[in-house]
């Protein structure tokens, strides 16, 4: 069964600090991996999408890494801001069809002033 | 342009009643998806529509759930005889196509509470 596990479940950091969120998956065959940010009461918004051949991809202060051999991904947030407080969801696709998506349960990040 | 919109934003209903949830996708997006997000759980795929093709209903949890998409645009998710376990946030997303590289754009969701 395809699974996506995220850790930690929740994280509290101070504004300006960096943090790293983890995603392990057992989805096969792998197509791509996405990180989404979901603010409270809103729908998820895509941050990055990574295919098999990509190791690192950045989007502003967000940097995602992918190790397809160990089936692990991380999302690093640099110089956190209060607006980074949200749930971060890892999503893995196992085929060329978008409907074959497996969602992690998310990491709830809280950034305190 | 306008994003994906959903209505209502919140719905409280009594057990046993039917409910209809609406999704307006981004204009021009041929693919439309419905997901369910329960507290502390990952998004659960329910159904998707792609153009005029028959929808993939493989994620619908029971025959109480149904969905339709009229004119290739607006979609309605209907839950009949609601149960308390149906309480969740129902998210709709649309994309330009079904290929995994097309980004899905999500609506804000409808929070359904069954009392």
Image (cartoon, coloured by chain):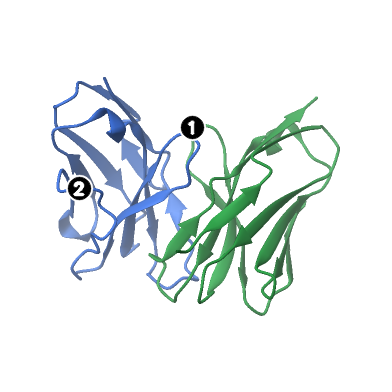
Quadrant assignment for the C terminus of chain B: top left
Neighbor class of circle 1 (other Cα within 10 Å; few <14, some 14-19, many 20+) is: few
Q: The green chain is which one?
A: A
Quarter occupied by residue A82: top right
Q: Can residue B52 be seen in the rendering of this structure? A: yes
* Farthest bottom residue in view: A53
Disc 2 target residue = B62
Chain ID of residue with mark 2: B
Relative to B90, say whether B82 is above or below. above
The image shows residue A83 at horizontal and vertical percentages of 69, 35
Q: Nearer the viewer, residue A90 or B91?
A: A90
Which disc, if any, is residue B7? none
Chain identifier, colour blue: B
User: Counting other residues with Cα less than 10 Å from the Cα at mark 2, is it few (<14), some (14-19), or many (20 or more)?
Assistant: few
Give the residue number, with chain letter if any, for mark 1. Answer: A41
State left or right for residue B65 relative to residue A82: left
**Residue B75, how many percent across, how many down?**
23, 50
Identify the chain of the residue marked 1, using the numbered disc in the image.
A
């Amino acid at each position: 069964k395809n699974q996506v596990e995220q850790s930690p479940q929740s994280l509290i950091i101070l504004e300006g600090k960096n943090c790293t969120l983890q995603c392990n998956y057992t989805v096969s065959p792998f197509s791509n991996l996405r990180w989404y940010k979901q603010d409270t009461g809103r729908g998820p918004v895509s941050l990055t999408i990574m295919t098999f051949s990509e190791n690192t991809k950045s989007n502003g202060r967000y940097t995602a890494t992918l190790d397809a051999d160990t089936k692990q991904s991380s999302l690093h947030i640099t110089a956190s801001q209060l607006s980074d407080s949200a749930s971060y969801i890892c999503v893995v696709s196992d085929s060329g069809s978008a409907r074959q998506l497996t969602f992690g349960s998310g990491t709830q990040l809280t950034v305190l002033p | 342009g306008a994003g994906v919109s959903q209505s209502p934003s919140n719905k409280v209903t009594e057990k046993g009643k039917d409910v209809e949830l609406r999704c307006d996708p981004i204009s021009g997006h041929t693919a439309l998806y419905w997901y369910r997000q329960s507290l502390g759980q990952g998004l659960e795929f329910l159904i998707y529509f792609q153009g005029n093709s028959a929808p993939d209903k493989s994620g619908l949890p029971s025959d109480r759930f149904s969905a339709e998409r009229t004119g290739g645009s607006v979609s309605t998710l209907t839950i009949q005889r609601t149960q308390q376990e149906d309480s969740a946030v129902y998210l709709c997303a649309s994309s330009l196509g079904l290929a995994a590289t097309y980004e899905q754009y999500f609506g804000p969701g409808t929070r359904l509470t069954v009392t």
